[in-house]
Amino acid sequence: AQSVTQPDIHITVSEGASLELRCNYSYGATPYLFWYVQSPGQGLQLLLKYFSGDTLVQGIKGFEAEFKRSQSSFNLRKPSVHWSDAAEYFCAVVGGSYIPTFGRGTSLIVHP
Amino acid sequence: DGGITQSPKYLFRKEGQNVTLSCEQNLNHDAMYWYRQDPGQGLRLIYYSQIVNDFQKGDIAEGYSVSREKKESFPLTVTSAQKNPTAFYLCASSISKGPLLAGRDEQFFGPGTRLTVL
């Protein structure tokens, strides 16, 4: 069975600072990996996804993520955070069941 | 515009009542999903359907029921057997390109329904 851990419940950054949100997964093979963003009271929107190939993937809104097999990680990064990036971020993993398992989410707070 | 709609946005229920949450999509997607979201617990899968007239239980199906009579519709009924139904409910869909590409499909989410039991 697959599982995913987002170790940070909350992350606070200043506007313009860099950001890294952590995601660790557990699965016997290379899973499919996704990052979604949720604004308050809304549904989720896909930021980026990884299936195979280049381990650094680019997404929307200036986000990128790097797949590291040796660390079972798929961390989300952004070089300069904007106030509008304040939201909840979810990592999801898809393994043999073909149904995604979501992490508990990381809440991003952006200080002006 | 194509997308997923959920109604109502807010729903209040008295204890002992069944309520049905609506989910409609016009994306021509085969697969549809229901998730429950509670603070600090992420998204937990209630039911999913990969084709019309077929659906499967997810991780927390007890106290819920669904139907999939039409491709575009996947209503969720929260029954009185659900002990703690107050939560935010999200519906999603994905295109489901077939077994060779299964799992790669992005999920598209509706705006959610917030259910409160009074």
Image (cartoon, helix red, strand yellow):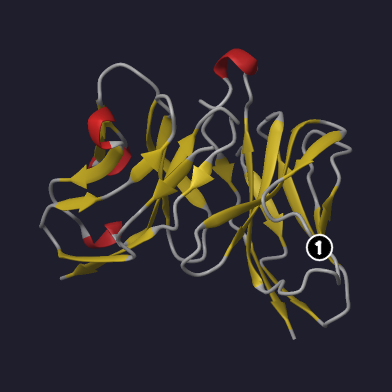
Quarter of the image that includes the N terminus of chain B: top right
Q: Secondary structure at mark 1?
A: loop
* Residue A104, image x, y percentages: 44, 58
Within the image, what quadrant is residue B79 found in? bottom right
Residue labelled with disc 1 = B63
Query: How many marks are shown on the rendered structure?
Result: 1
Q: Looking at the image, which is closer to me, B118 or B55? A: B55
* Residue B82, image x, y percentages: 79, 69
Quarter of the image that includes the C terminus of chain B: bottom right
- Say which residue appears at 61% left-offset and 41% top-offset: B3
Q: Is residue B16 left or right of residue A2?
A: right
Q: Chain of mark 1?
A: B
Task: Say few, some or many: other residues with alpha carbon within 10 Å of mark 1 (under 14 / 14 to 19 / 20 or more).
Answer: some
Q: Is residue B15 left or right of residue B4?
A: right
- Say which residue appears at 40% left-offset and 23% top-offset: A51
- Say which residue appears at 58% left-offset and 30% top-offset: A98
Which residue is at the far top? Answer: B100
Q: Looking at the image, which is closer to me, B88 or A62? A: B88
| Mark 1: amino acid | Gly
Within the image, what quadrant is residue A6 found in? bottom left
Q: Is residue A25 above or below residue A83?
A: above
- Say which residue appears at 65% left-offset and 33% top-offset: B27
Q: Is residue B3 left or right of residue B7?
A: left
Within the image, what quadrant is residue A15 found in? bottom left
Q: Is residue B4 left or right of residue B12?
A: left
Q: Is residue B85 above or below residue A18?
A: below
Which residue is at the far left? Answer: A17
* Residue A63, image x, y percentages: 25, 41
